[in-house]
Image: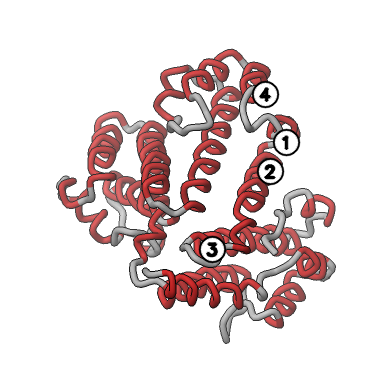
Amino acid sequence: MIDKQYTYAVARIRSKEIMLLSKSDVEQIMSCKSEKECLRLLTEKGWGRPGDETAEQFLSAEREKTWELMRELVEDMSDFDTFLYINDFHNLKAAIKQVYTNTSRDDIFITNGTIKPELILTAVQEHNFSLLPDFMRSCAEEAYYVQLHTADSQLCDIIIDQASLETTYQKGKASGVEVLAEYVELYIAAADINIAIRSCRTGKDKVFLERALAACDTINIQSLSSAATEGEEAIYEYLQNTVYADAVQAIKKSLSAFECWCDNLIISHIQIQKYNSFTLSPLAAYILAKENEIKTMRIVLSGKRNDISDLSIRERLREMYV
C-alpha cells in the first residue's frame, strides 16, 4: 500500500470514527430502562442489520460490518491476522475435544480466523498435523496426544492457550504496524498477570506457570511465576517494579476490574492514532475501538437483561475511543 492508499483508507476510517459511541452515547444508553429500549436506541445509532432482534445479533452485526469495511480498504488482510489467531486456536481446542469425544457440532467453531475450521478438524481427525501452518503444527500435535493419552483437558487447553499467546505476540511484533506491536505487548502482559493471579489463588505450581505464561518485553515471566508461587502479595510487589504498577489496585478490587483496567490502558495507548494519517495503524486502532465498543455494549445489554444494578454495570464499563 502506498501513502496515497493509506490516506484514502484513513479518510474513510475518520468518517466512521464519527459514528463510534462516545461517553455521552453510553450514558444515554445506560439511561434506558430495558434491554429492548437499549436495542431500539442502538438501532437509531446505526447498529445492527435489518431484521436483527437479539443483543447477540446486534453485536455480531457490528463485528461483521467492521471486517467488511477492512476488506474494502485493505487488499492484504493478513495485516490484521494478529487479531484473528485467537480464533484459530479456539477452533483447535474445539476440534480436539470433538474428535476425542466422538461428537459432531458445527456451532462450536468460529469462522473469522486465518485457517478454515474444516482444515483444522481434518488435521486432527486424520492425525495429519502437517496440514496446519507452522505456528500451530507442533502445539496441535502435542495437545492432541496429551488429550488422547492422559485425558487431561486442562493441560491440553494450557498448551494451546500458550501457543495462542506466543503466536499473537510474535506476529504482532513482526507486523511492522505500530498499533499492533503495542497492542500485543499490553495484551500478552495482561494475560500473564491474569494467569499468575488465578494460578496463585488455585495453588498451581511453578511447572504449571511456566507452561502457561508467554514471554513479552514488559513482564519477566520467570520473576512473575516465582512470585505467583509465593502468594498474591509477592505478585503485587513484583508488579510495583514494572510499568503495570497501577494495575495492583484494580486486581485487589477484582479480576473483572483488572480486565477493565487493561482494556482502558489499550484504548489510552491507541488514541494517538486519531491524529495519524499515513500508516495502517489508524485502521488497526479502529478495529480495537470497535471491539471495545462491542464489549461495552455486551456488558450494558446483559446487565439490563438480568436486572443488574446500574452501579454494578458502570463498574465494568470501558473508556471510549472517541
Q: Earlier in the sequence, mark 1 or mark 2?
A: 1
Indicate the secondary structure of the residue bearing disc 4: loop
Indicate the secondary structure of the residue bearing disc 1: helix
| Type of amino acid at the residue the image marks with label 3 | Pro
User: Where residue 69 sits in the image (x, y, percent)?
Assistant: 48, 75
Q: Are marks 1 and 2 in contact (CB under 8 Å)?
A: yes
Q: Earlier in the sequence, mark 2 or mark 3?
A: 2
Query: In the image shown, does 141 or 15 lie closer to the viewer?
Result: 15
User: Where residue 234 sits in the image (x, y, percent)?
Assistant: 63, 16
Identify the residue at horizontal 65%, vertical 80% (top origin): 46
Q: Residues within 10 Å of mark 1 (few under 14, many from 20)?
A: some
Identify the residue at horizontal 54%, vertical 26% (top origin): 199
Q: Can you tell which mark lies on residue 240?
A: 4
Q: Earlier in the sequence, mark 1 or mark 3?
A: 1
| Type of amino acid at the residue the image marks with label 4 | Gln
Q: Residues within 10 Å of mark 3 (few under 14, many from 20)?
A: many
Nearer mark to the viewer, of 1 and 4: 4
The residue to which callout 1 is attached is 250
